[in-house]
Amino acid sequence: MALNIIGISALYHDSACCLVQDGKLKFAAEEERFSRIKADDAIPRMALKYCLKEAGLHIGDIDCIAFYEDPRKKLGRQLWSGIWDRSAILRKKFRPRWVEREIRDILGYEGNIEFFDHHLSHAASSYHYSGFDNAAIMTVDGVGEWATTTYGMGLGSNIDLWEEVSYPHSLGLLYSTLTNYLGFEVNEGEYKVMGLAPYGTPRYLRQVRELVTILDDGQYALNMEYFDFLEEERMFTDKLAVLFGKPARTRSIPVDQDHMDIARSLQVVLEEILINKALYLHRKTGSPNLCMAGGVALNCVANGKIIKNTPFKHLFVQPAANDAGGALGAASLAYTKYSGQLMQQDKLSHVYLGPRFGTAVIRQMLEATSLRFHSFEGNPEKLLKATAARIADGKVIGWFHGRMEFGPRSLGARSILADPRDAGMRDKINAMVKKREGFRPFAPAALDSEYKKHFDIDHESPFMLETCQVISPIDLPAITHVDGSARLQTVSYNTNPRFHALLEAFYALTGCPILLNTSFNVKGEPIVCTPEDALNCFIGTNIDALVLEDFIIDRDENELDILEWMAGVMTTKYAAARNTYTFI
Amino acid sequence: MKATGVQKKQANDLAALLYGQDDPCLSDQVKSLAAALGIGQLPGIENGETASYLTSDDRAPGDNGTLPGRIGIWNLATENGEEIYIRDQGARMDWWLWAKVHQFPARPAPGRKRVVLLGESVARGYLYDPFYTVAQELEAQLNRVAPGGLEAEVLDLARTDLSLPMLKNILAECVSLRPDAIVIFAGNNWLHTMKETFGPADYQQLCHLLDRGSLQEVGALLEGRFRELVTSFLEFAGGISLQSGVPVVFMIPEFNLDDWTSNPLEKNVTRLNNNGAAKWVSLVESGEEALLRKDFTALEDIAARMITLDITHPLGYEWKAACRKAAGDWPAARTMMEKARDTAIYGRAETKPRCLAVVRNTILEQAPANGITVVDLPAVFKDSCPDSLPGRHFFLDYCHLTVQGIKVAVRQTAATVAGVLLGREVAVVLDDSGLYPGDEAIAVAHVAAAVHNAHYGQPAPVLHYHCSRAAEVADLTRDFMRNFVDFSTRRLQTSLCKTHEEVVSSGVFTQYEGGLGFIHDRKKKLLDVALVDAMVAVASSPAEKLAEKMLLLRVAEHMPAADYDVNLLEACYATTSYDEFNLEIQERNYYQARSHRSDFTFVADGRSVFSATITGRIPGCTRGVQEVRILVNGRLLETVALQNQWRTISIQLPAGPLTREGVNTISLHWPAPEEHRPAAPASIQTPMEFLDFMYPVWGEIYAFDLRKAADDNGLFANNNAPGYTEALQASL
């Protein structure tokens, strides 16, 4: 009988679940994809059901549920920080052993439960899936229990975190605070600030450095005069506006050059600190390998700077480096504890770990609708040519194929695809579907055999977690950021043959081995999971065509007014409630 | 600011104590650590608090001469120099909840008596609105009741889902509109507000009473709280009336006593002492047999014993009422059905709106002292049908009235309001107002009523009645029913189905949110077996093989295949209605039975062999294992053993004679709980814990999958093959 470990991250934000079977990651999914509540924090009951079903397991077959943080320690920090006294909701939620109760009562689990520290779970989520047999480890996020940043070393199956920075001093909270000050949503808008930075100049370095001081070893300290982490509405004090000489931006105020300059300054200081701490870590460990995790590790611009400016030779960032990935780390920690063995996991090569849907199911579904569609069953080559032709024709495609990705990035399973050569494509997609700020860049997906000719990077980047300069002879305005960079995904046949084949078809047709690839969702909603979600998203936006496995639905061949009206009403009337407040 | 080592240790120590505590009382060590850290709020300190209803939104009653900037969804504006209220574009999401009045003058027209109508969906004329409403009928009747004496305009400010706090707000606001009278037609939606007044201390008290078997005292506590709530509201409304000089008339709603019966969740079994649960099941099973035999003598005896055993359960009352109805004893039948209705106070499930006797009685007792005039609709309907109970002729569902029902209710109300306005007694005018919705609107109301009744657990005869009435009035509803049969039978979410799109496109369902009323919540689509069967019966024509088409579609969409499991815990197989045990309870990852029987629907071709895999457990089972009987279509298939931990079992369902072509039922009959999950009354803190205590779990199912046997070659072996359904349908 296999050793079955379920890893869970939940009850904060980005709740997720995974199954590690005999030391191998088998399935994983975020709860939000099933509940359709963005960043859902609920205990991941639907994601668990999915993992069990896919593996053919019963709940009694699970040897252990591993939870990604220690609720006692977290409560200690909440009691000390004052958030406990301030938040009636937090107190109302609290019950003795409430996490265990949730796992027993909501998930119905009767077996062993293991709790691992938040940052240890982050560390394991990277190191245990990196393929390294030794590595320096740095985790950086908002806050877990007490730690906000940790330093350590992975050797064999063992992880030793020997230093931490404690709350309230936190690079993640620094970034979130300025995200909040710049008028974006905390836990959501950090990507926007990163995207905004290249438009600015670092005119506010002095002010940002006033907010945080680099200390010896792994330490740094926030200047708490400027921060207030107990407020629900804002994370900063009035002094912050005085410091920057500008009131905090609200959503109705357009982003201006000052905002861009602040974002740039923040990015520069963040990179300075991370490089400083990575150098310290390298001095301490001497390992050529670096594993990073935590929400800050999703800052792909900083990651690129770290690898360029430190002696580390290899960097591994697990694609769900945010809290969702904590599930992977908790599971691998439990596996090593229970089996006494190393994870049987090679370097994580893909994250197509979510649900998939068969052609027969999709056909049955489409036949029940009024939609006209083209079937390419049994003829994938023709499907790919037809899809490539549409993209080359300037169309925006909803692409639904195979198992859904785990983590915040769409990597060719639930993606919106378009021609990166089209100068107007960024605005077009923003207007028709993403409804997001125009300054945010879209990312390229490139054939693994061709990417070096177009991007200044010497290694594959399968998870879209590194930025590099665009050096392509082809003009690629839709995926090139204002500073000439791009957040690249390299696509290999081994991990996603159909997406790879689509890139080849587009290459054959146009001479361009690159596609614009962005997540298949509308603003404020999770990435689509099921064919129904994909149809709803297609109907509610102006995507030109939807490729649902072996079928293509063209917008211009369908009359969608009624369906669009219904989708609009349902979006407003039946919108799932969101829990926007995060207890830190 | 950084935690010192000492502080960090103290905080962690305190967290460890709080997190791991079993004793709800706080220890000295906890208190000492909390004091050292300056923590003011600890778990348990807030336990004594009970939620206060209507605090933050309380408005000062009375009209100070200025117009409020907003009333309900209407904003104050000026148009052609006149002050008006117009619907707020920013509140478009809420428009559907409110009366479909786009704008109205802030002040009444000169010489006209302005009557403001406030109330719940019942006051909107749900399912006829906007083609026919209570406000329209009231205005028409007012202008007939005292010809020449009244020039009345009725301003409709009713709102679907109006809660008691909302009612208070709008009552205070609407005084500024200078009405001559305010009519309130409400009281169905107040149960939730009453429940919100309960806190941990109340739950603990209720659990102590339950533990002692004092069900009477449980009822008394709940009713006492409700009485306080209603009294408080009447005092508030009386205060508004007194200060503003605007008379208030209160219409007490009536309930569909003849037809509306408890849904399966409302039949959950109460925690009963002294082996009471086993006795209860025995009585229920004997009662079902007596009902089948139409042996009302036996049934009445059983019902009486059930009522004695559990006064909080509706079924004993309903069966007793059925016996009394059969005997023509209408007063007794009414009393029993009122008691059945009122068991909603015990929170057995999320019941549909209703006005309980305690609300009615409190209003009748206390309204006069608060200067409020009452129209007692239960008395009005009782007079209207002395030899029956008010049922489907007056009601579209539980409380929403038919055209006939609205006319009966408003006739008396108009006379009462006219009397208040004229300062003298005004006789009821028996002549009809002549105001009617068109045939199409009436038909749509009935077909929507059929759907609404089905979605809230009502039996086939009621569904058939409304479908038939719809078809009698307007033939177009047959087309709708054909479409409904299709989209309801498919697995695809309804809003994406071609046939649902046709319904919306037809434009005839304005009364039912333009057809969006047929849309289900995510993962809550029902199979609607009884409703679809009723529609097939009504909409079929000799030229159309609708029943055969429907059967083929059901099999194609829902029958398991050799490579495709059907998950019987999905809503469409595990439930027959949208009813919920409790909306506040977080959904669990497994099915919970709170009564002796769990029914699941599956679709078969009558020839195939299936295998079922069940992962189940019996909480509190201390004997090692207990037997669970599994029945298919009422016939025993197998007895399996489950224990208090998950156990997976497999069973075979042979082809015929147990299974039949089409819809089948597989049932699990649980043993009565010998022990309940441990929960001391003193530990109860939340509604969920209270409900778990009062309605214990009998059995739980984590997974229930049905698969066609791999070597079976039944008729529909390839039902999931592409185009299979269409090919078969085309062949018919």
Image: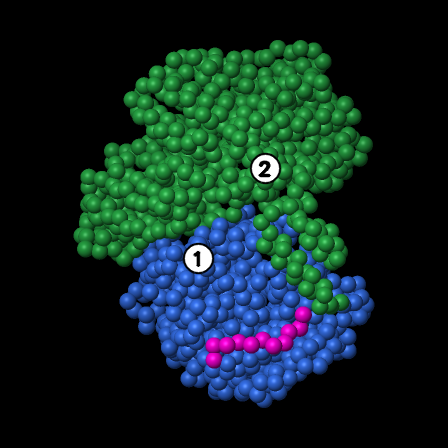
Chain colours: A blue, B green
Q: How busy is the neighbourhood of tag 2: few (under 14 within 10 Å), some, or many (20 plus)? A: many
Q: Quadrant of residue A497?
A: bottom left
Q: Quadrant of residue B601?
A: top left
Magenta-colored segment: predominant secondary structure: strand
Counting the numbered discs, the total is: 2
The vertical placement of B327 against B62, above or below, is above
Marks 2 and 1 in Cβ contact (< 8 Å): no
Q: Secondary structure at mark 1?
A: loop
Q: Amino acid at mark 2?
A: Tyr
How far across and down, in percent of the image, does residue B575 sit? 40, 41
How far across and down, in percent of the image, does residue A514 sit? 46, 78
Q: Chain of mark 1?
A: A
How far across and down, in percent of the image, does residue B566 sit? 32, 51
Q: Chain of mark 2?
A: B
Q: Secondary structure at mark 2?
A: helix
Asked if the stretch drawn in magenta spans residue B34, the answer is no
- Name the residue beneath numbered marker 1: A111
Of badges 2 and 1, the one in the foreground is 1
Q: Considering depth in this image, is B706 or A162 the residue closer to the camera?
A: A162
Q: How busy is the neighbourhood of tag 1: few (under 14 within 10 Å), some, or many (20 plus)? A: some
Q: Amino acid at mark 1?
A: Gly
The vertical placement of A318 against B593, above or below, is below
Asked if the stretch drawn in magenta spans residue A162, the answer is yes
Q: Considering depth in this image, is B294 or A69 the residue closer to the camera?
A: A69
Highlighted range, magenta: A156-166
- Label drawn at residue B203: 2
Q: Quadrant of residue B160?
A: top right
Q: Considering depth in this image, is A319 or B317 the residue closer to the camera?
A: B317
x 49%, y 50%: residue: A105
How far across and down, in percent of the image, does residue B676 sit? 46, 40
